[in-house]
Image: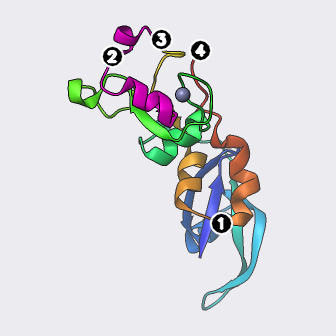
Amino acid sequence: MRTLILNASYEPLVVVPTRRAVLLLLSGKASTVAASGLKLHSRSLTVDAPSVVLLNQFIRVPRRTMTLSRKAALDRYGHVCAYCNKYGDTLDHVIPRARGGTHSWENVLVACFRCNNLKADSLLSELGWKLPFELKAPEASAAALITMRWDVPDWEEYTRPWQYQRMQLAG
Ligand SMILES: [Zn+2]
């Protein structure tokens, strides 16, 4: 059994075993936001197992960079081809891998099949194409990481508003 922990700002922080979340409740460090409907038993105690708890005090957390994957890139760029703005579902290396381009957020965008084929192993400058935006690694919100790893419908309303907050495109 797992519990979603929210920062005092309601931003999702982390997922922990429910027993750890119960300790936070018992020590007064958190309050229940949503119950799981299940009970947790120990020798002396029976408690309602929380599905989501809220920390009573805000804690600062360092930001991490989102790991590049096909799914993360398609999510981030919304399946839109960076070159023609039509539907795209392939990853394109701006500087082709064959010419030393890296597989990183700074060199990867989403392209449609047609643009990807047209571009092939050319540089943008050779085709007269331009980058529509600056390529940067997105910061990972904990919410995005949690959503990727855990598929718990009860948590959606808490993670959804925060998921893409830090994944907006620059410029
Ligand atoms: Zn295209």
Q: Nearer the viewer, mark 2 or mark 1?
A: 2
As measured in the structure, the alpha-carbon distance from the residue carrying label 1 to the one carrying label 3 is 41 Å
**Residue located beneath label 3 in the image:** 130
Circles 4 and 3 in contact, beta carbons < 8 Å: no
Judging depth in this view, the residue of 11 and 144 nearest the camera is 144
Q: As shown in the figure, which amino acid type bears the numbered disc 3?
A: Lys
- Binning the other alpha carbons within 10 Å of mark 2 as few (below 14), some (14 to 19) or many (20 upward) gives some
As measured in the structure, the alpha-carbon distance from the residue carrying label 4 to the one carrying label 3 is 15 Å
- Binning the other alpha carbons within 10 Å of mark 4 as few (below 14), some (14 to 19) or many (20 upward) gives few
Name the residue furthest bottom. 43
Q: Position of residue 28 (x, y in %)?
A: 69, 60
**Residue located beneath label 1 in the image:** 152
In the visual, does 138 lie left or right of 96?
Answer: right
Q: Nearer the viewer, mark 2 or mark 4?
A: 2
- Binning the other alpha carbons within 10 Å of mark 3 as few (below 14), some (14 to 19) or many (20 upward) gives few
Q: In the rendered view, tell whether residue 14 sits above or below residue 8.
A: below
- Binning the other alpha carbons within 10 Å of mark 1 as few (below 14), some (14 to 19) or many (20 upward) gives few
Residue plotted at (32% across, 19% down): 122
User: Is 68 included in the stretch rendered in magenta?
Assistant: no
Q: As shown in the figure, which amino acid type bears the numbered disc 1?
A: Val
Q: Position of residue 152 (x, y in %)?
A: 65, 66
**Residue located beneath label 4 in the image:** 171
As measured in the structure, the alpha-carbon distance from the residue carrying label 4 to the one carrying label 1 is 33 Å
Label number found at residue 13? none
Q: In the rendered view, tell whether residue 145 sits above or below residue 112.
A: below
Q: Position of residue 3 (x, y in %)?
A: 62, 66
Q: Helix, strand, or loop for circle 1? A: loop
Q: In the rendered view, tell whether residue 57 sits above or below residue 54.
A: above
In the visual, does 5 lie left or right of 156?
Answer: left
Which quadrant does the N terminus fall into?
Answer: bottom right
Marked residue nearer the N-terminal end (2 or 4): 2
Q: As shown in the figure, which amino acid type bears the numbered disc 2?
A: Leu
